[in-house]
Amino acid sequence: MAFFVQKFGGTSVGTVDRIEAVADKIVTSRAAGHDIVVVVSAMSGETNRLIGLAEQIQAQPTPRELDVLVSTGEQVTIALLCMALHKRDCPARSFTGAQVRILTDGSHTRARIREIDSIRIKDELGKGSVVVVAGFQGVDENGNITTLGRGGSDTSAVALAAALEADECQIYTDVKGVYTTDPRVVEDARLLRSITFEEMLELASLGAKVLQIRSVEFAGKYKVPLRVLSSFEDDPGTLISLEDDKEMEAPIISGIAFTRDEAKVTVTGVPDVPGVAFQVLGPVSDAGIEVDVIVQNVSADGSTDITFTVKRQDSEQTRALVADIVSRIGAREVTFDKKIAKISLVGVGMRSHAGIASKMFKTLADESINIQIITTSEIKISVVIEEKYLELAVRSLHAAFDLAGDAATL
Amino acid sequence: MAFFVQKFGGTSVGTVDRIEAVADKIVTSRAAGHDIVVVVSAMSGETNRLIGLAEQIQAQPTPRELDVLVSTGEQVTIALLCMALHKRDCPARSFTGAQVRILTDGSHTRARIREIDSIRIKDELGKGSVVVVAGFQGVDENGNITTLGRGGSDTSAVALAAALEADECQIYTDVKGVYTTDPRVVEDARLLRSITFEEMLELASLGAKVLQIRSVEFAGKYKVPLRVLSSFEDDPGTLISLEDDKEMEAPIISGIAFTRDEAKVTVTGVPDVPGVAFQVLGPVSDAGIEVDVIVQNVSADGSTDITFTVKRQDSEQTRALVADIVSRIGAREVTFDKKIAKISLVGVGMRSHAGIASKMFKTLADESINIQIITTSEIKISVVIEEKYLELAVRSLHAAFDLAGDAATL
């Protein structure tokens, strides 16, 4: 017998029929002897409907009231799911974030969890009930309703698993788990059976949008084993855990992530003096623009080039800011390129294996794909290339590193 | 400067535009220097939508979870109304029933209010805020969400007015107030400027469906002056208050109520022995069937007749129950009549004025309308007649008792 926190997202509870299917899954877990705490999101579309109502009134709805409004979405789901469980003669009890006392700070619409009162939940579990908790929401120390921001239900689930010391936090979603790369690009992408937190963080932030990155950080910090699996199929999915838990023969590369929603900005002829990178990038980050890759190469003849990438939607605003900077610091010029893609190889195994980078570069060269930027971290190598070569590059790398799956693992 | 609790029902907050109109009304009240606590219902249709979802899952949804579900309706409205007030630069803060701590018993879906913590609301009022409270809901001593049953928002408003010692509880609705009778039947029905709690109770229970009867009882008990007025027009409406507050020259008759949704059951030849009325009516009320008028006439030759009325929708069930009783107690026969209507004259003034009843009977006789049953109370005379004469009877009585209004009062 184990103790699981199971989280079901908006698509998994999007209709009454799907809620009934979720109830069936929970009943099956219980029949296997497990204790279950369930965390649910709002039915898909509901949060947007509520925000739509608010925006008809205020272009920028008051954050405190927006939280009061949107938190009703999850409250509806917990009640309906409990009814579906009762219909199956399964004892169950619903709790809002305030009732369970998921204590957060007072930052409405993006609150951070501080503490969870586990006593009430443990009481209910002790009585043999399934405990159904509204995700995404909490309460501040003054009793105000708060929300954790979009995707916060994953974070609620991990936080509950940590506070209650669950054996596993299971995130049910509409995919089967984490793949070596996007199966829409590489047909024989393989479902990963296990992956480390670090790898998952690199993959998630780079575009494999399976889990909220914040919840992965949280799970890693509190050492909560996290499993991603499908609401609609019967498959164990992907287990995300500490490196130590991984099998000995871990693969060198776990997956290939990519993104094509970035734009590249290069400032050339920047005077190579201390503080110049800050002069270029300070105003950009002050404007709330998220900067991803930053590369500065060694200096030649007293000047250098700085390249960075931003979200494509921020490129016009960035252009205006940087034009201003360039004239102020006396740089030569600034160039923009929206037609780029970033590809990253991720794997804890690469720490101890030389030659991954050169194999990557050779694979791309063999396809005559030019590399514009290279950056590396301990468990990741990223390159920026021309966007049109993205699919070709991902498929070539997937094959070169032998990531393809066979029927048995899919 | 006064302190008002203002309640807006589902129709008054049925759309975003109407919520904006409610905000305008509140801002006007505040500009006049008043302190305002607002109680709102769910947007019209929302409660039914939520119950519909529940009933797709459980024919009889679990009461605790049903409360968790439907209480979201009012929560949505409080948030949206606060946003509309903020847009008008009017400070406002929303509270759910749990946040304000409207403490109820644990009877889910029909909870009774026990206590209200007025401190938090008074704090907010002290800061100059409008306080917006979700009607219809509360919380039991274990922190479970409860609801007060349909129409419970009126009760919430009156309870808050009592706890906070407001000067007046104003119930905004889609009618202008309480009329001498239904304006759809009598064109020149007059809007009453004031009425006593007792009169309102008799009128409300008899079909003038303006206010929840429970909230009127509550207001009477705690001596909270209650005002019914229109959300859509600018008119002071009807004030419901203690008899003492009424002007000296109170009219003898305040209004004429009527209903046509009842059926009449007569059991003839009932042995006139002690306990026989209980034998006839006990099984009916045990079955949860509401009995309205009960009349038993004096006995002749050792047997008597008992007549009572039930809701028309309950008549088939009643027929089966009574058939069984009749044979058991040895009564002669039972007759049913669905085509009846009940008309009641209501007025505190009739206590001290003789001749009201005879004037009523003469008026009906002049129109050749036969009276089937007569019952009276301190401030009410009711008659049951054939349904087809209803409109004629109400119009004749309205004219005979001089209840018609003039342009000035409408």
Image (cartoon, coloured by chain):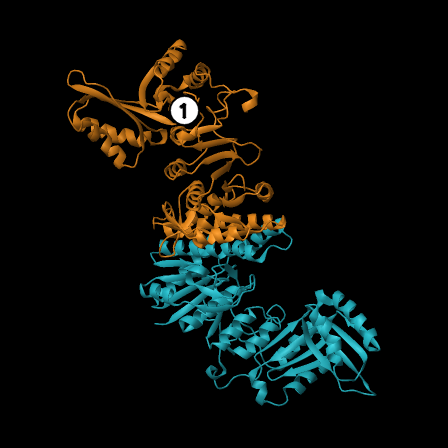
Chain colours: A cyan, B orange
Q: Quadrant of residue A313?
A: bottom right
Taking B28 as reference, is B361 left or right? left
Q: Secondary structure at mark 1?
A: strand
Q: Chain of mark 1?
A: B
- Say if A65 sits above or below A165 in the image: above
For the residue pair A44 and B108, the one nearer the viewer reads as B108
- Say if A318 sits above or below B181 in the image: below
The residue wearing badge 1 is B258
Q: Quadrant of residue B318?
A: top left
Q: Is residue A233 visible?
A: no
Q: Is residue B371 visible?
A: yes
Q: Position of residue A85 (x, y in %)?
A: 38, 57
Q: Position of residue B9 (x, y in %)?
A: 50, 40
For the residue pair B347 and B364, the one nearer the viewer reads as B347
- Say if A373 sits above or below B15 in the image: below
For the residue pair A323 and B87, the one nearer the viewer reads as B87
Q: Residue at x 18, y 27 (%)?
A: B276
For the residue pair A347 and B27, the one nearer the viewer reads as B27
- Say if B12 sits above or below A42 in the image: above
Q: Position of residue A311 (x, y in %)?
A: 69, 68
Query: Label 1 is placed on what type of residue?
Result: Phe
Q: Position of residue A36 (x, y in %)?
A: 39, 66
Number of numbered labels in the structure image: 1
Within 10 Å of the Cα at label 1, are there few (<14), some (14-19), or many (20+) other Cα atoms? many
For the N terminus of chain A, the image quarter is: bottom left
